[in-house]
Amino acid sequence: MKKKPALTAAIIFVAMIALIAIVHANGGQFAGTGWALVPPLVAIILALVTKEAYSSLFIGVLLGAFMAADCDILGTVDTVTEDALISAVTGTAGIFIFLVILGIIVALVNKSGASRAFGEWAQKHIKTRAGAMLATFALGVLIFIDDYFNCLTVGSVMTPVTDSKKISRVKLAYLIDATAAPVCMIAPVSSWAAAVSGAVDTDTYSGFDLFVRAIPYNFYSIFTLVFIIVIAILGYDYGKMADFEIKAQKTGDLSILNVTNEKRERKMEENGPATPHRGKLYDLIIPILVLIVVCIWALIRNGMNSLGGTATIREAFSETDATVGLPWGSIIALVVIAVYLIIRKVVTFEEAMECIPQGFVAMVPAIIILTLATALKNMTNGALDAEAFVKSFMVGAGKLEFALPAVVFLVATVIAFATGTSWGTFGILIPIVSVIFPETSGLFFVGISACLAGAVCGDHCSPISDTTIMSSAGAHCNHIDHVETQLPYALSVAGISFICYLIAGILDRIHLVWLSIPAGVALTILFLIVMKNIVAKKA
């Protein structure tokens, strides 16, 4: 961290501690009030100012613990240790295992030379930058089962392709992130569909039925996919993303704006040494297929076990636990892949064992950030009870009638951005939205969709979101760079979605809500065409 941002962070931290102490001394309450959202918001602001995620997240955790412990110093230490960090590690241990195993699999495939073979194939068959971006998009859409699985798999497979076309790593991270949660949120068979189904409780509709009916009005998810296709075809970027892309094309530096020899050498070390040409293209395809098939089977099996062994696939997904199913499946996949590559003689047993610590080391930054982000969520949603504040706010907003879907979208976006969790956001809001909108209302499904879309949008923008963190890990780029370059794109789609929810509220009066969907697609395309002209004039 540079001296000036470090000083800024210290000043903000001390000022917030003093403010919290003053409020507490005057009888102020923190839990269940707007103060519950202050620690994550401070962490996000610090991350954007200092460009450093670890200290920013930890400061957010400290502030949350200080409030939860009623400004008691020793109580703060207890809260940070037990309620934040230990609880975070315990709750995400399964995801840590999954991360490490995927890191090992990537190291194995790289060691075999299969990644290089895929890169050479891609150079021959994918001729343009647009083709590389659309291929990344297509793979992201195909892996719709789980966002964690999507982020790391797409990143490991498509890195050679995007690198060969001089697409920056932050652009790759955006493509990964934008086809992870948005795709999972509109796929009827996914861990996200299961989570939404479990959060819904109505007299008329089952959770799954409600989820499917809400898909067409999930504007943010749908328009994000349209956004990616159009901007890839038009072939331009704006905001900070344009700076990284120009740098990548002119200098070949794919990851950072200010290139130094030291940073280049470090990147080469992270990517690993050059591998011999032993592996073939199918030595990449077969391990990926094994991983996908086994993990899907593991998710279904976990759901079946939860229901006593007899259930449909849809019911199994509604009860599956990805934090158990994914590590379970990835362990089996790792053994099968290692044995396959050894039998193929593209790696030796000794080389395969060397990949174990390599895979772990590669995932350490993501694990640290994920631990701190989860600890911060524990403070916000647990110790400080942000849910109570959100409920009181939404009850007051229930009088806005036609604008209510747009308000729901905005509230869900802010909560998901501040807390870094989309599942926690719609878990809080769906029961409230179900009460605000009568089930007989034409806006009932639009309101539910607005809640889900806002949750995805806020999660997509948030530096403390686990999906955002894993997208950075999958693309091997700086996390804050990914956040800063992605934010203008995500906010652009968010603005269009907000307008479309207002349009939907108006069209409901003449029973033509469905027209808001093509209107939003047209707005997205028009916005990107206008932005291209603006960028061209500036250039």
Image (cartoon, rainbow, N blue to C red):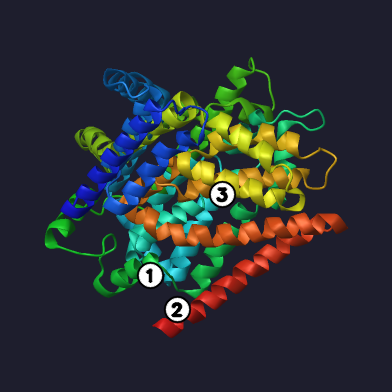
Give percent across and percent down for residue 430.
Answer: 66, 35
Q: Which residue is mark 3?
A: 182
Q: Which residue is mark 2?
A: 535
Of tags 2 and 3, the one toward the viewer is: 2
Task: Give me the residue at 66% from left, 65% from top.
Answer: 521
The amino acid on which the numbered mark 3 sits, given as a three-letter code, is Pro
Q: Residues under labels 1 and 2: Cα distance?
A: 10 Å
Q: Which residue is mark 1?
A: 242
In the displayed structure, 238 sits above or below 513; it is below
Return the residue found at the far bottom: 537
Q: Relative to the observer, which residue lies in front, 313 or 402?
A: 402
Does the CB distance between marks 1 and 2 fall below 8 Å? yes
Q: Residues under labels 2 and 3: Cα distance?
A: 27 Å
| Precedes in sequence: disc 2 or disc 3 | 3
In the displayed structure, 529 sits above or below 484; it is below
Give percent across and percent down for residue 374.
Answer: 40, 32
Does the CB distance between marks 2 and 3 fall below 8 Å? no
